[in-house]
Image: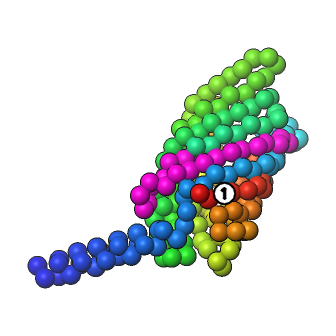
Amino acid sequence: MNNVLKTSLIILANFICAATYAATFSYDQIQLVVGQTITETSFSSQATDSKFARGSASLGIGDVLFLAADGLANNVNSGRSYAFGFGVHLPVNNQADVVAAINIVNASINSTGHTESDAGISSSASLRLRVVPKFELTGGIAYVSVFNNKTTGIIYGANLYLTDSASLVFQGNQSDKSQSYAAGLRINY
């Protein structure tokens, strides 16, 4: 019984320390990025090139949960998507968080005057790492399923803090079907 009590106290102490570490990263943020996606088509050797703008926001709830919303518009087929979901961030230490998120996605495209819409799901798991006080790196995997198209890719990014609440954002995504790159601004509130 004594070992069970010791183990329980150690787990409780680790949880309390983890909650303290979690406060070092902010998940209360608004972000706007612009970027480019290059998609390989399966029926030809040519690639489709599209430009996009994406806005996103998240709101931290407690020490480990957050709500997220995302909107994207691109210049090919008047494509749009909206996503709403939630995630968890679990501190590894005061310099790193493991982040997992799941979203419901609603996407639409306009092709030759006809609009098609579909609902799907996206999920991701990543590691957020503070390399130095004003610089973060992120890397992980993402899965998206929409329009009967399922893809898994690698996500990566970097944030360079200009102030304590504003950072330049650089992001990328690489899958077997496309590559995308984006840059923008993130504001923590």
Q: Position of residue 104 (x, y in %)?
A: 53, 38
Label 1: few (<14), some or many (≥20) within 10 Å?
some
Q: Label 1 belongs to which residue?
A: 187
The region drawn magenta spans 49-68
Whether residue 11 is situated above or below residue 148 in the rendered picture: below
Q: As shown in the figure, which amino acid type bears the numbered disc 1?
A: Ile
Whether residue 56 is situated above or below residue 21 in the rendered picture: above
Whether residue 91 is situated above or below residue 182 in the rendered picture: below
Which residue is painted at 68% across and 74% down in the image? 134
User: 59 or 49: nearer the eye?
Assistant: 59
Which residue is painted at 60% across and 71% down in the image? 129
Q: Is residue 3 visible?
A: yes
Residue at the extreme top:
113
Q: Position of residue 173 (x, y in %)?
A: 71, 54
Q: Quarter holding the C terminus?
A: bottom right
For residue 51: magenta? yes
Which residue is painted at 70% across and 39% down in the image? 72
The secondary structure making up most of the magenta span is strand
User: 155 or 162: nearer the eye?
Assistant: 162
Left or right, 76 with reference to 105? right
For residue 58: magenta? yes
Q: Quarter holding the N terminus?
A: bottom left
Left or right, 180 with reference to 97? right
Q: Quadrant of residue 187?
A: bottom right
Left or right, 52 with reference to 17? right
Q: Position of residue 27 (x, y in %)?
A: 54, 58
Q: Position of residue 179 (x, y in %)?
A: 77, 51
Which residue is painted at 62% across and 43% down in the image? 70
Q: Is residue 102 visible?
A: no
